[in-house]
Every structure is written in C-alpha cells, then in structure tokens.
Amino acid sequence: SYHGRQMHIEQQTHSSSCVLLTDTPVSVCEMFLNLNWQLLSLACVVTSCESLNSFFLGTYNVNGQNPKESLSPWLASTTTPPDFYLVAFQELDLSKEAFLFNDTPKEPEWMLAVYKGLHPDAKYAFVKLVRLVGIMLLFYVKVEHAAHISEVEVESVGTGVMGRLGNKGAVAIRFQFHNSDICVVNSHLAAHTEEFERRNQDFKDICRRMQFSQDDLTLPPLTIMKHNVVLWLGDLNYRISDLEVDHVKDLIAKKDFETLYNHDQVRQNTLQFVVFVGFTEGEIDFQPTYKYDTGSDQWDTSEKCRVPAWCDRILWKGKNIKQLHYQSHMTLKTSDHKPVSSLLEIGIKVVNEESYKRTFEEIVRDIDRLENDCIPSVTLSQREFQFQDVKFMQHQAKTVTVYNDGQVPCQFEFIPKLDEPSYCKPWLTANPAKGFLAQGASVDIDLEVFVNRTTAPELNSGQQQLEDILVLHLDRGKDYFIFVTGNYLPSCFGSSLSTLCLLKEPIQDMPLETIRDMKSTSQGSNPETDKPQEIPKEIWMMVDHLYRNAKKQVRIALFSPLLAGSNHSVSEALLLFLDALPEPVIPFSFYPQCLECCSDSSQCRQIISMLPQCHKNVFNYLTAFLQELLKFSAHNRLDVNILAPIFAGLLLRSPTKQDSTEKRKVKEFFQHFLVQTPSDRDIHYKSPE
C-alpha cells in the first residue's frame, strides 16, 4: 500500500540521500541523486501536514452500580465538543455470573448512559466496545472523522485469579487515524495499599501479553508500545504510602496536594523507572477520587476506613500531545469512586493523498528505469546460527544485520521453500520478516526460537529437530540462505501421558533414540520389570507438593500470582503441564460423548471407565486431589464453581474452538466428579502425606 511504503521511505530517506559511491558511474549517480531528492520531497509531503484533534478520556469505577444519574457533568464538561471519546469503566458488574460467564445486563445500561451524556453540540458515531468481566472501554468519534479510522482491533488480558482471570486486568482498542497508530488501554490493577509490587507486575504482564494481530499475517503482532500514541487510563489502584488516614485528610483539607503527591505510589514507581516508563501525567490539582461513601462526598466511614487515594488515573505516551485539562467530577455520587477526565490535544499525521500518489508514482517510474543498471544486493553479518539448550516456553533470539551494499533501494522478504506453507518452521520466527532498505542502510532482523505446546511433542520425541533454512529474497534480486540449528532439551511439558508413564528417570537424561523407540520396545518388554507407572511421576510430585503445603491456603494464594514462593510456581506448572499435553487427560475422541451425557452422572463415570489406563489413572488422581481441596474449603475458600471452570477446560479440551454452550457442558460434565466421589476408581487414591 502507499501508506506502508511511506513509512519505510520516511525512515530511510536521510541515510540514502547522502551516500554516493565514488566508483559508481556518473550517470547512475546523477539518477540516484535526482531520485533521492524526490524521496525527500515525498517525506516532506507526508510529514509536514499535521492536524490537531481533541481526545476526551474518562475513567470511572462504578462499584457494580446501575447508572442512576446523568453522565453529562462528566462527559460533556468541555466547552467545545471533543473529536474523540474514550470512556473506561471498572467494576461494571461484581456478580458471580459476570465473573464466570463474562456476561452482564449492565453493559447496555451503561452504554446507553454514555451515549446520552456525550456533548450535545456534535454528532458521534459508535466505533467499538470491548469488555472483560467488569472492565469496559467505549470508543466514539465525530461522524466527520469516522471515514478516516481503520485497522480497529480489540484485545483483553486477565491478571486476576491465577494471573489469568478477568476480575483484574485490561482491555484495549487500537486503531489508525489518518497515518497515526493509536492504542488506548483501560486497566484495573490489583487492590490494597501494600500490593504495589503486584500492581507493577500486572502492568508488565499487560504490556507483555497484550498483542494485536495485523492484516498482513506474516507480520508479527503489535504490542502496546509499538504505537505512535498510547493512552492509558483506568483504576490503577495505586495508593498513598506511609501516611495515616487522618494526616492524609488534613492535607486534603488544606489542599496541600504537592505534599500528598510525594507519597503517591504512581509517582514513586515511575521515578524509579519501574512502570510507565516514557509516559506523562498531567499535574494533579484535584482531591483523591477514592474512597467515598456511596451517594455522598463523605470519605469512607466504614470499619475499614480506607485512606483516600488517587486510584483513577490518565497517562499518555507519544509526541505532539498537549493536555488541556485533568480533573475529577465530584457531582457524580453513584459509586465509591469519583470519575476522572482528561482532554488531550494530539497532533495527527495527515497525508495529502493526491500529492503523495503523484510523487510516489514518479519515484516508481524512476526506479523502473534504474532496474537494468542496478541489481539489488545486500550483505549479511552472519549466515549460520546455533541455538544452545533451547527449553520449553523459554525465548531465545539472535540477530542478523542486513546491509544494503547495492546502488538502489531494495525490498526484502523471507519466502517459503518449495512445497512448504510458511517461510520457517513453527518454532522459529524472523522479525521483521520483510521490509524496505534504502541505499547504504541496514536493518537488524531478530531470529527468535520459541517452543510451545504445539511444537514441543515432536521435538520431545525426536521426530523433529531444531533445523531450518531461511530464504531471504530480494525483490528483483537474488536469494540468500540462512542456516538455523540448535539443540532442544526434552521436557515433560508437551510429552504424552503414556510416554511419561514409561519413563523411570527424567526425560532430559534419556537419549532421543530411547524415547523414540520406547513404544515398540515396551510391547516386547517384561511386564514385571518394565511395568509402566500408574501416573507420571511429574504429576505426583506437583500434586504432592500442593497437598502438603497449600491445601489450606486461600484460593487467591493457591492459584494466583499473589502468592510469593513455590506454591504459586507449582500450581502454575501443574496447569501449564495439563494445557501442554498433546492428547488431553480425556482424549479428544471421547469429547463428543462427554458433551452428550454431561447431565447424567452415571454415564459420565462410565465414559471415564473406558479411558486408556494411564489417562484414567491421571483423571481419578487429579479429581481425588481436588475433592481433598474442597474438604478444606473453610480454609482455602475454594468451591466447585471456582475449580470446575479452571480444570474442566484443561482435562476435557475440545479439538476445535469451543462455543459458550460447549463450555457450559464441559463444566457440567466435570462437576459430577467434584460433588461426589466416582464409584469406579481403578487405582486407590492415597493423599500424599
């Protein structure tokens, strides 16, 4: 596309326009000089045109309440109507149904309240909504700007229970407006004053896990920080540290916000470059927005008597951004929080399409004339790469530098080899996989190796090795070959249950030939000396550790990252192990039967009795362990509604994507084994004591 080429040209113009090789023929040099001046003129056309647009950002933790009052004092508080509205909510619905099924009737109620509260002096078009449990983000734009919005994508990341569920986390909308890429993030981070490190980790997890797919599937996903403009708002839950509640209220009464702000956890952590590095927040000259008695302006009078804090914040990252106001809205009293708003004026890149197209076409014609005189050429810093001791789910990367030593700009791309669907094996990626290089310019390409549950089984068994050849193709030029090799350390993650039951020692200590031949060897083995284990020792070790050390710990400690130490690590390892099985505990072939009889407890148990022996043993062992946990529910606060959704989806996986009906049936099937003990146990469960 024109826009895609323009971005490459902008980045490379200055280096290419000043390089002339002394031994280049004069006619070619003159043509290049003329071409580079045209490139410069094109860059000027693209970058000199900038429009200023106003963005209204609002955040409101509504504490699970219904809309009871007009939102106009908040949303229509600006003198002139803004061009964009990005409206964020937290705790939209605190019910168990919203948490378990991500469904709430309050979504349309608040959406209607927002629409009615928008500035009355302009017409707005609804663009997008994204919600994760109670975290919701709405996007409206003036109708005259709607045609210039493209590439709208939404994503969500849960950081709550187990570090994954959506009671805490973030939702985001990314889009392109004219030629500027914008990402808006609404987050609700971990609560409580002392949990600032957990909030820091939530922020880092959101930045790492939030990824947007691109229209060109060969390009890597976009992360939050890859955008020109990042707008971050929400209930960040950072508190006031080291001050007693009465002292805080006294400072507020004196409007001594500067002293109070020195104890603000957002300020403290940003100064230490822990979170929000490169972000800007406007001056806070309003009193803390949390916590009030609902329906009033009175500070929290409950038994907990929370210390007031600026929990609700708005920050930004990018160039040409000016904040026009940053304020709270005390007149709204629906919640124990007060809503906050910020009006930003952002410079947006706007392309003169007619001038751009005309200049671009002239450049293409000149490049075509040069084609017969100048063939693209590059040099590679290295052509062979060796990755040592690659492990499951652990990223490794090496860099190859591609330098354009030819006389013309060139386009490069990794292309598939003959009869292969992709340019590389699924465990390998090249980033960027294609691009544009001006004369004398260079680019660093990261070769990244990452083994996940999809690629691990064949590597564990030795059926595949870390070996691949990448073909780097130059448009109108030749191909260059990059050789990638490595050694993978086999792991229990991604190995089948039947294989692990046959292993008497750690899988990394066994030769690949032994693992590959184990099935055929076991068929002729001595049943007394080579009898397989009833369950893999890895499962026993993890369950044994959790049973001994964590059975009485509350659920937020047993299955969430809030717990420091080995219990959290072991619980995460157990869930990852089950998720990585190439064939789940209940094999895929039994999946339709399980859904059909999900309402009949006896038929469900009958299906389990027909599983392959090692699969049946593991299922019985895990369900017995979960039943043991439920016996201590008074201590660990676990119940069937918490455990069933987590483990049902791991033990009974669908070979294809599940819909909501299937998820409900899977949970119903598995609940039979938590509420009553199956009568057809084939192994005697003994709690590891």
Image (cartoon, rainbow, N blue to C red):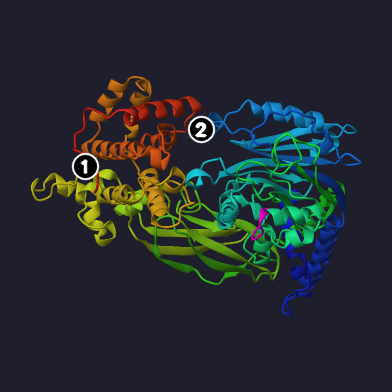
Front residue of this view, candidates 422 and 70: 70
Considering only vertical position in the picture, is 143 above or below 194? above
Question: Based on the displayed image, in which of its 4 quarters is residue 631 positioned?
Answer: top left
Q: Position of residue 613 (x, y in %)?
A: 21, 37
Left or right of residue 531, residue 306 in this image:
right
Q: Looking at the image, which residue sits at the far bottom?
A: 22
Residue in the image at 17% along x and 46% along y: 532
Determine which of the numbered discs, if any, sits on residue 100 in the image.
2
Left or right of residue 149, residue 121 in this image:
right
User: Residues in magenta?
Assistant: 241-245
Q: Is residue 550 visible?
A: yes
Does the magenta segment cover residue 88?
no
Q: Position of residue 209 (x, y in %)?
A: 56, 50
1 or 2: tag closer to the N-terminus: 2
Residue position for label 1:
686
Mark whose residue sits in front, 1 or 2: 1
The amino acid on which the numbered mark 2 sits, given as a three-letter code, is Leu
| Mark 1 crowd level (few <14, some 14–19, many ≥20, 10 Å Cα) | few
Question: Based on the displayed image, in which of its 4 quarters is residue 166 positioned?
Answer: top right
Residue in the image at 49% along x and 51% along y: 562
Front residue of this view, candidates 352 and 125: 125
Residue in the image at 23% along x and 29% along y: 609
Q: Position of residue 148 (x, y in %)?
A: 79, 41
Left or right of residue 284, residue 641 in this image:
left
The amino acid on which the numbered mark 1 sits, given as a three-letter code, is Lys
Q: Main secondary structure of the magenta part?
A: loop
Q: CA distance from mark 1 to mark 2?
A: 32 Å
Front residue of this view, candidates 526 and 480: 526
Considering only vertical position in the picture, is 520 above or below 269? above
